[in-house]
Amino acid sequence: MAAGVRPGILGQIPMPSEPVIQLPTGYLRMMEALNLLQEHTSIPIAMPEELTPEQVRDILTTARLLRDGVLNSTWTTGTLVLRPEAPDDAFEAIGPDSALFIGGDEWVVTVGQETVPLGPCHRIFFHPQIAGVQRLEDGSRRVVFEPAGGGPGRAEERLGPVPGT
């Protein structure tokens, strides 16, 4: 166990008053996910009494990212805004024979009332093509991109900064 990382706090988990043969559906998966989260943070994580469906999805998704190192998904359209000072050749990065790396976000998951930051993350969109460019009032440009060849495109999410930055 890494220095400063504490084991999961299991004493706060409400247990049934009578013996049971089977735990509620998904209970073990959630406990495994929370344990994996605890291994990556010094913030104490306890099983909350209630979780929203969105929190359950986010916790399980984050655990999959931590375990597998990557989340694979598909996409149909994306939008990014280039600052006014961005050079015109920034568009050259968006093409059907390339991948578009977008970083700068922090991966954060909420467990009950506790917000747990896990560090920077980046997204990779494979084989993008420019669908449209709109110049905004402040001089920045909104770029809409879509998968080359039609249909959904492949994307990945990873923890860590964009490689090479």
Image (spheres, grey):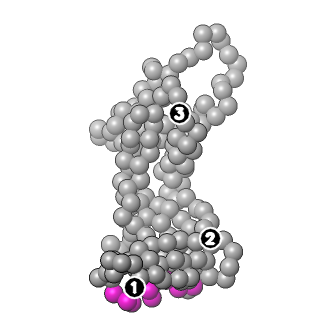
Q: Residues within 10 Å of mark 3 (few under 14, many from 20)?
A: some
Q: Nearer the viewer, residue 68 or 161?
A: 161
Percent across and percent down for residue 124 are 50, 70
Residue 127: x %, y % from top left: 57, 80
Principal secondary structure, stretch drawn in magenta: helix
Q: Residues within 10 Å of mark 2 (few under 14, many from 20)?
A: some
Q: Which residue type carries mark 2? A: Thr
Residue span colored magenta: 87-96
- Mark 1 to mark 3 CA distance (whole Å): 42 Å
> How many numbered tags mark residues here?
3
Q: Residue at x 53, y 18 (%)?
A: 14
Q: Give, as a three-letter code, the residue at label 1.
A: Ala
Dot placed on the residue nearer the N-terminal end, 1 or 2: 2
The crowd level at tag 1 (other Cα within 10 Å; few <14, some 14-19, many 20+) is few
- Distance, label 3 to label 2, CA atoms, is 30 Å
Q: Are marks 3 and 2 in contact (CB under 8 Å)?
A: no
Q: Is residue 33 magenta?
A: no
Badge number at residue 90: 1
Helix, strand or loop at label 1? It is helix
Provide the residue designation for mark 2.
76
Label 2 residue SS: loop
Q: Specify which label sits upstream in the sequence, 1 or 3.
A: 3
Quarter occupied by the N terminus: top left
Disc 3: which residue: 51
The answer to whether 164 is drawn above or below residue 108 in the figure is below
Residue at horizontal 53%, vertical 83%?
132
Q: Is residue 160 above or below residue 4?
A: below
